[in-house]
Image (cartoon, rainbow, N blue to C red):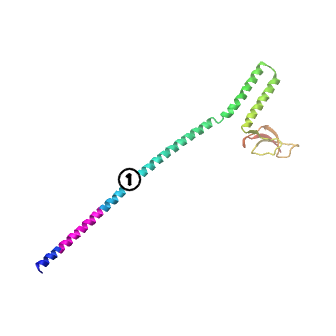
Amino acid sequence: MSTKEQHNETTDTAAEETLEQTAEQTESEFADQNEAGENAWEDARYVELTKQAEENQQRYLRAQADFDNFRRRTMKEKEELAQYASMKLIDQLVPIVDNFERALAAASSNSDYDSLAKGVDMIFRQLFQTLEAEGLKAIEAVGQPFNPEFHQAIMTVESDEYEEGIVVEEVQKGYMLKEKVLRPAMVKVSG
């Protein structure tokens, strides 16, 4: 080989090596830039998701606090309602108590027992009307078939007037409050 050919071959080899080094360097720089771009995108996404998680946590805590406040307020209202549920009825009964006091005062200063009996009867009707307005009603018992849901039998008696299993006498009145039995009637039943 001539020196010129050797020189050309060395130059070609050096050029190829330089070209390979440049290509490797370019690939490495591109990979670094690409990785840096991906890292920047991942960092931005991470920051955004962290911000969303914090906002959701704050919303959750506010909702939890609102619910706790609602529950406390509801319990307080329920306690107040139970405490003052009879207020309306008591307000209606106070005038009746006043009438009883007047009747007793009149009876002590006057010995007219007929007037006292008439006054007490009027007060009783006023009281019963107030209770009826609240949903109280007497259970009809005499002449009705015995029903253990409404009647409490205290004894059985022989009766020519009623057939067996019919309420003959009411010993104590029974009452219903709206649709619920408040107190069953104590009765005697024909046997």
Q: Residues within 10 Å of mark 1 (few under 14, many from 20)?
A: few
Q: In percent of the image, x 44 and y 49: which residue is there?
A: 55
Quadrant of the drawing holding the C terminus = top right
Q: Residue at x 35, y 55 (%)?
A: 43
Q: Would residue 174 be visible to someone looking at this image?
A: no
Q: Quadrant of residue 177?
A: top right
Nearer to me, 181 or 148: 181
Q: Would residue 17 be counted in the magenta stretch?
A: yes
In the displayed structure image, the side of residue 151 where residue 77 appears, left or right: left
- What residue is drawn where x is 36% and y is 57%? 42
Which quarter of the figure has residue 8? bottom left
Q: Position of residue 30 (x, y in %)?
A: 29, 64
Magenta stretch bounds? 12-32
**Picture quarter containing residue 157?**
top right
Which residue is under mark 1? 47
Q: Residue furthest right?
A: 160
Q: Residue furthest bottom?
A: 1
Amino acid type assigned to the residue bearing label 1 in the image:
Val
- Residue 129, placed above or below residue 2: above
Report whether residue 2 is seen: yes
Of all residues, the one furthest to the top in this rendering is: 109
Q: Give the answer, above or below, for where 12 lies relative to 190.
A: below
